[in-house]
Amino acid sequence: MIVVAGRIQVKPEERSEAVRVALTMAEATRAEPGCVSYRFYADLADPNTFFIFEEWESEAALARHFETPHMAEFQNQIPRFVGGPLEIKRYVVESAAGM
């Protein structure tokens, strides 16, 4: 499984638009084959800090994701509302179990 986790700082004046774009992206992405989960979250202490958490069945599924029209549209819109550097990491997970 591939896990992608990141932090995005959004401009306060663009927050509502960032939420709209994130929700649109998440809905389209969750419909993709190989997407286990795809969610955005807001920091409780700083609502202008968003977190993204993705789980993918495989590298191939993640690679296909980057070729989708909704990803291209998302990448075109990001500069408008991002207020700092993106911090995104990709992890390869060998196993996961509930606790």
Image: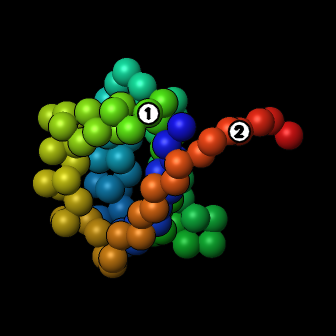
Query: Which residue lies most toward the bottom here?
Result: 84
**Residue 5: mark:** none
Residue 76 falls in image quadrant: bottom left
Question: Callout 2: 10 Å neighbours few (<14), some, many (20+)?
Answer: few
Q: Is residue 78 left or right of residue 6?
A: left
Q: Which residue is mark 2?
A: 96
Q: In the image, residue 10 lies at what x, y percent? A: 36, 69
Q: In the image, residue 11 lies at what x, y percent? A: 33, 73
Q: Earlier in the sequence, mark 2 or mark 1?
A: 1
Look at the image and tell me in which quarter the N terminus lies.
top right
Secondary structure, mark 1, is loop
* Amino acid type at image mark 2: Ala
Rendered position, 3 above or below 6: above
Question: Callout 1: 10 Å neighbours few (<14), some, many (20+)?
Answer: some
Q: Is residue 41 left or right of residue 98?
A: left
How far apart in space, not on screen, are marks 2 and 1 (Cα)? 14 Å
Q: Which residue is mark 1?
A: 58
Q: Nearer the viewer, residue 70 or 61?
A: 61
Q: Is residue 23 visible?
A: yes
Q: Is residue 98 left or right of residue 34?
A: right
The residue sitting at 47% across, 51% down in the picture is 4
The residue sitting at 35% across, 47% down in the picture is 22
Q: Is residue 39 left or right of residue 31?
A: right
* Amino acid type at image mark 1: Ser
The residue sitting at 19% across, 53% down in the picture is 75
